[in-house]
Image: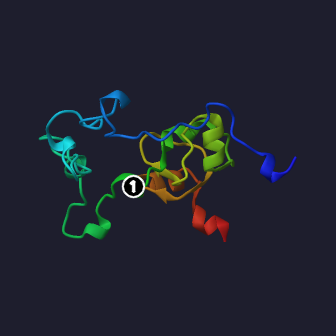
Amino acid sequence: MRLGDLHPREGSRQKRKRVGRGPGSGTGKTSGRGQKGQGSRAGGGVRPGCEGGQTPLHMRTPKLRGANKARSRKIGMFRKEPAIVNVGGLAVFPAGTVVTHELLAALGLCRESKDGLRVLGTGELTIALTVQADHFSATAREKLEAAGGTCVLTSEAAE
């Protein structure tokens, strides 16, 4: 077989639609554009983003608010959604365990997230644990250290 022997299968290629070639063609007179209106005119059609009286999507979505927009909550794909676990949820581990995001996700105690892990301070903890996370709230840090455990930021653990 050579490159010149290749040809498309039967019916895989559609013929080009020739419009405005008389009533017998099926696309004569108005050329498939309907009767009157915006879509029938030259250069016509609804512009992208127009929703016909309804407020367009780009105006309905929330924007960055506040005096300092750089620190405001991001929107859409720029928003970070870290996995969250409370201090009370860590009480299932035996003392001395090194608790990581992967371990918590494997046990179903938090969801998997590419944006890291946040440890919050709800609940009680009486055992000493070493917890590796991207962020600790002030109360979570207090409760972990009061129980004899340590808080390790994952950026420090990587080094």
Residue 118 against residue 91 in the figure, above or below: below
Please state the horizontal and vertical placement of residue 112, each as a whole percent of the image: 57, 43
- From the viewer's perspective, is 77 left or right of 101? left
Residue depicted at x 55% and y 42%: 126
Between 67 and 53, the one lying in front of the other is: 53
- From the viewer's perspective, is 11 left or right of 20? right
Judged from the image, the secondary structure of the residue bearing numbered disc 1 is loop
- Res 64 quadrant in image: bottom left
Q: Quadrant of the C terminus?
A: bottom right
Between 63 and 9, the one lying in front of the other is: 9
Residue depicted at x 53% and y 56%: 145
Which residue appears farthest toward the left when viewing the image? 53
Please state the horizontal and vertical placement of residue 115, each as a whole percent of the image: 51, 54
Between 110 and 28, the one lying in front of the other is: 28
Residue 63 against residue 67 in the figure, above or below: above
Res 128 visible: no
Please state the horizontal and vertical placement of residue 75, each as a whole percent of the image: 33, 55
Which residue carries the number 1 mark? 79
Please state the horizontal and vertical placement of residue 132, each as a whole percent of the image: 60, 56
Which residue appears farthest toward the right when viewing the image? 1
- Res 17 quadrant in image: top left
Residue depicted at x 16% and y 43%: 38
* Pointer 1 local density, CA inside 10 Å: few below 14, some 14–19, many at least 20: few
Under mark 1, the amino acid is Arg
